[in-house]
Image (cartoon, rainbow, N blue to C red):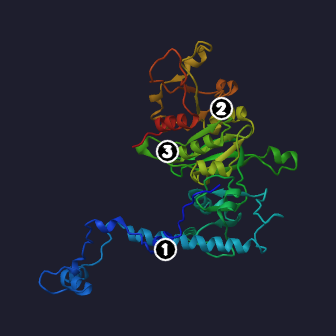
Amino acid sequence: MWKRTFSTHGSIPLLKQYKRTSFDKYLNIEKPKKAWNNDFTDTKFEKEKYFKSKFAHIHSRQKLKPKEDKYGKKIAHVNKLKQIKQDQKLNRKEHLQSFTKTLSRKDSWGKLQANPLLEYIYGTNSVIAALNNERRKDTLNKIYYYGQDTHQFIIEKLKSLGLNDRKMIPLQESNKQELNQLSRFNLHNNIILETKPLDIVEINHLGAIQDTESAQFSINVTNDFAIFADDIKNDITQNVPFTIKQNQGKSFPVGLFLDEIVDPHNIGAIIRSAYFLGVDFIVMTKRNSPSLTPVVSKASSGSMEFLPIFHVDDPLRFFQKSQLEENGNWTFITSHCTSGTDNEPVTQFVRDKTLDIHDLNGMAQQTPLMLVMGNEGKGVRSSLRQVSDYFVEIPYNGPQHDIQTVDSLNVSVASAILINHLLPCP
């Protein structure tokens, strides 16, 4: 059967000769000419000649003006680059030191290990206060720091304190991870002081006022080194200075007694307020009270180093002995709820000894005072309330609601308010 076929061999050469054309060539498109190629005066300017002829006067005018950094961006940028460069150097140094043994106390993994017999004071104000404390003069061990700015700051402070000899207080550069470990991840401001814990003097009772001119009163210190029975009976008496401020109505010493306050942050805040408002000393119960740790030092902003702080093992005996006439006839004012509640109505004993908060003003002009603050939850224990001379309460001035959730103040805030009424600002 015959089949008709179509041959395409004749058309292939024609397709090879065909050239594809773009549709754009049929559009009227004109490229914009550059400014220096415009021909208005039958002269064509080159690019360099064009800009010199048009903008040379502007460039020369800018040269005459001084360079201004109105918002300080250039200086900030330069400082930022310097800080980045310093951080890179420190990171490089830390990286190299990780492969070698350092002089610091390291564990088996090469990390800085805290000495359990020492404490690490962190924070700028706390460290400076500890360096200024004469009681820590022989217990300063080492200063850890991070950053060149911190190092320069430490050198200047040590020089001003006369402690610029490196043999006295060695300086050791550390990284932030090590400082975080030593401060237990608290805010350390790139500086930590390694030192021995601060010893607190334990006393039995307060003593009499020597005289108002010398501004000193005595304390009866516990004899920790008693060997024989006669040594226990012998009293060790020390003198403690206090300030006289007639403009605040203060002629006698004012102390603060803290009864089993357990939160170290509250202790630090109370110490800071007491130091700021003019309290002469603080007495704390030995049991159920925190030690003067770096946490307390940080919360007190270093004021813990300057305010005399004592411990008492027997608070009831401390109250009774200090109230004797031969020991100065100290007056104890206890913070207590004098208005009573539905569950605990006020007794006649408390009502007879209640003072208005405004009556505190001027009492330091007549007799030595001790302001007593109690535990965060239970307040002052009942045995100490029984031997207190007066009671005082901060009145509630807030709105009245059926459901009352805020019926008291934090103990540090309440202490500051009562101290301010005892020692009002002139």
Which structural element holds mark 1? helix
Which numbered disc flags the more N-terminal residue, 1 or 3? Answer: 1
Near mark 2 (Cα within 10 A), the count class, few <14, some 14-19 or many ≥20, is some
Looking at the image, which residue sits at the far front?
1
The residue under label 2 is which amino acid type? Asn
Do the numbered discs 1 and 3 sit on residues whose CB atoms are within 8 Å?
no
The crowding category of the residue bearing disc 3, from other C-alpha atoms within 10 Å (few below 14, some 14 to 19, many at least 20), is some
Above or below residue 59? Residue 311 is: above
Which amino acid, by three-letter code, is at mark 3?
Leu
Q: Position of residue 314 (x, y in %)?
A: 74, 36
- The residues bearing labels 3 and 2 have C-alpha atoms spaced at a distance of 22 Å
The percent position of residue 412, horizontal first and vertical second, equals 56, 38
Of the residues tagged 3 and 2, which is closer to the observer?
Answer: 2
Q: Mark 3 near mark 2, Cβ–Cβ under 8 Å? A: no
Q: CA distance from mark 2 to mark 1?
A: 108 Å
Quadrant showing the N terminus: bottom right
Which residue does the image show at 70% across and 40% down from the upper left? Answer: 289
**Residue at point 33%, 71% (across, down):** 69
The residue mark sitting in front, 1 or 3, is 1
Amino acid type assigned to the residue bearing label 1 in the image: Pro
Q: Which mark is residue 318?
A: none
Crowding at mark 1 (Cα within 10 Å: few <14, some 14-19, many 20+)? few
Q: Please state which of residues 376 and 185 is positioned toward the viewer in this rendering.
A: 185
Quarter holding the C terminus is top left
- Residue marked by disc 2: 375
Q: CA distance from mark 1 to mark 3?
A: 108 Å
Q: Which residue is mark 1?
A: 13
Q: Secondary structure at mark 3?
A: helix
Quickly name the residue at label 3.
Answer: 277
